[in-house]
Structure formats: structure tokens, C-alpha cells
Image (cartoon, rainbow, N blue to C red):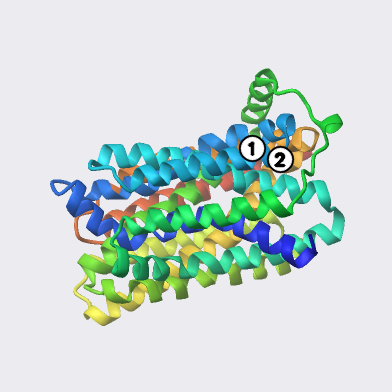
Amino acid sequence: MSRPEFIALIAMMFATIAFSVDAMLPALPQIGQELSPDNVNRAQLILISFMVGMGAGTFIVGPLSDSFGRKPVILAGSAIYIAASAACLFVESIELLLLARLMQGLGASGPRVVSLAIMRDLYSGRIMARMMSIAMMIFTLFPAFAPLLGTGIIAVLGWRGIFLAFIVFSLIASTWMATRLPETLPKPNRRPFRPRLMISALHEMVTHPTVRLSIIVQSLCMGMLITMLTMVQQIYDLVFDRADVFPFWFAASALVAGLASLLNATIVVRIGMRRIVTWVLFLQVVLAAGMAVASELTLPHSTFFALFVAWQATLNFGVGTTLGNLNAIAMEPMGHIAGMAASVIGALSTILAACIATPVGQLFNGTIQPMAFGILTMAGAGYLLMLRMKRVEELQAV
């Protein structure tokens, strides 16, 4: 497999998560009206259940691939993902759909997590960094256009057609990987699956003050992102009556995350990870407070909409300048258990973020106030915890 083909394959496996989340956004109103007409806010849980399943899968798929090989775990995850997607085609209740989405997230964690291990198996150093940057750039572009793709599928096949697209997407990726990529972890290099080591790693991480604080702040930042994702389509539709242009504005604001990642890579060495995260969270406290105040004022409709779109872009900017830095902060003291630590951090932060965002999303009342006050609270808590992290680091340096 040539390097360009390998990068394209890795990017496609990365994109499984973005496609599974962002392409669903235009379908949420129809699903809510059809399967939960008495409480359409429950349709938001379609995103949350997927995230919870993905978080749970992240905890185990890395260690499983170390024991059984990369390809079997990816193919098993793809099979679960495809089966769950097929189930979504026929469910007639919101409860069964949420269960199927939970299993879909569990399956999607295989390609997403293990593809990173495959890249580490084959490449290292600057070559790996360059290839990862290219793959992540492709990955960043995909979620920007996923809602637009979802809108097109719904127009032709209805909302259930999106799950058919998921099946086709996963079949292409898994078949491509199975036929073109050899196993990258030879049997002599595999390690037994030991749950006790996972529990030990979890204990070490939650008792390390910097790592613990970083995971909590990362959960809050992801919670802000998930809150935006679960509520943004309803806001465009019910608050601004602009559901028809939602995919286009979403694409424009999502591209900001990619630009923020490039900016972060340029300045992080000079400024430092913790300082960047602290500044971004403080900025979001100010902006979220401003949006909360604006929601109480009688502003021209177009002005209020422009303010919201700009705020949405800043939330995506925060994704590019906080999550990677917080993950690096948490990983830095855990070099001796890096693989296990990566799985634990990903699992804990994703599940905690889903738990934080869920009650906020369910408070949606036809205004942006629940979103503004919810994100203000998360950003404020994250900012205070980053100040606490600074104090912990100063005490450790003494």
C-alpha cells in the first residue's frame, strides 16, 4: 500500500465518527416528530447514545488490538457498526433506536481508535507526524460537509436512508482495509489482555492531580461541543427559522476548527498548552455570558442570528485549541503506560462529556438560553479548574 492510499484509508476510518454524528443532525427533527412526538428533545439522545457507546468502546478496543491484532478488532467493530446501522433501518420506537445507536458507537470505536495504533506500528517520528497531519486535515474537512450530505440523503431516501449510507460507508472502508492492508502487529509482539492492568492504569490516572484535572476539563470542553451539536439544528429551525440553510452555516463554522488546529500547532510551543486552554476558556466565559445577555434583549432578528453564528464559530475554534492540548497534558506524565492511558482518557472524557451535555440539551425550550447558560457554566468550571492546575504545577515545582 502506497503512502497516499494509506493516508486516505486512515482518514476514512477517522471519518466514521464524524459521519455518524454530523450527518444525523438534519434528521433529528423528523425522527423526533415520528418516534417521540410528545417530547421531540429526546431526539438529541440519538447523538448522546452514540457518544456513550463510542466512549465505552474506546476503553477496551486498544488493549484488545494489542492482544488479538489490529485487523480482527477493526473488522469486528465494523461488523457491530453495520449490524447496528441495519437495525436502525427498521426500529419503530425511540428506545430501540437509542439502543441501536449505542451499539453503533461501540462498533465505531474500533476503526477510530485502532487506526491510530496501525499508524504507530508502521511509521514513527517526523514521517508519522506528517502523515497524521494530512489525515487529520482530511478528517477536519469531513464533518463540515456531513450535514449537507445528510440533507441530500434525507431528500431522496428519508431519514432512515442515512443509516443505509452508514452501512455502505463502513463496508467500503472495512473491505478496503481487509483486502489491501496487511496485519501490522505480528503475533510475537502481541500482549495478553489483562483487565487488572486497565484498572491499575485507571487508578494511577485519577489519583494524579494534573491528569485528573485535565480529564475533567477535557470532559467539560467536549460537553460544550456536544451541547452545541445536540441543540444547534433545533436553534436554526425553531429560533431563527433557517433550517434550510443550516448545513451551509454549519460547514462554514466547522471549518474554523481546522484553522484553529493549525494556529494551535504554530503557537503552542511558544505559549504552552495550559496557558492556551486557560485563555480560550476565559474567552468562552465572556462570549457565552454575552450570548446569555443577548438572548434577553430585543435585537433585530438578523443581528441576533449573526451573533449566534459567530458564537458557534468560536465554539468550533475552542475544539481546535483545547482538546488536543488537554489530551497532551494528561498524557505527558503517563508515558510508561501511553497506550492504556490513551484509551482511558478517551473513554472517560467522552462518557463524562455526554453525561454533562445530556441534561442541558433536554432543557431546550425554543430559545438559546439553555445552550448559553449551559456552556457558560461548563466554560466557567473549566477555567477555574485550569487555574487550579496552574497552582498544582507551581506546588510540584517547589
Q: Is residue 313 above or below residue 394?
A: below
Dot 2 lies on which element?
A: helix
CA neighbours of label 2 inside 10 A, class few (<14), some (14 to 19), many (20+): many
Q: Amino acid at mark 2?
A: Arg
Res 212 → quadrant: top right
Disc 2 versus disc 1: distance between alpha carbons? 6 Å
Q: Measuring from the top left, give residue 372's x and y in whole percent.
A: 33, 58
Residue at left offset 22%, top offset 61%: 367
Residue 210 in view here: no
Q: Residue furthest left?
A: 38
CA neighbours of label 1 inside 10 A, class few (<14), some (14 to 19), many (20+): many
Residue at left offset 39%, top offset 45%: 86
Numbered tag placed on residue 73 in the rendering: 1
360 relative to 186 in the view: left or right:
left
Numbered tag placed on residue 341 in the rendering: none
Q: Measuring from the top left, give residue 83's x and y in whole percent.
A: 45, 41
Q: Is residue 211 above or below residue 43?
A: above
Q: Measuring from the top left, give residue 21's x and y in whole percent.
A: 44, 55
103 relative to 363 in the view: left or right:
right
Q: Nearer the viewer, residue 113 or 388?
A: 113
Residue at left offset 36%, top offset 66%: 153
Q: Amino acid at mark 1?
A: Val
Dot 1 lies on which element?
A: helix
74 relative to 41 in the view: left or right:
right
Location of the N terminus by quadrant is bottom right
Q: Is residue 71 above or below residue 266?
A: above
Q: Which residue is mark 2?
A: 70
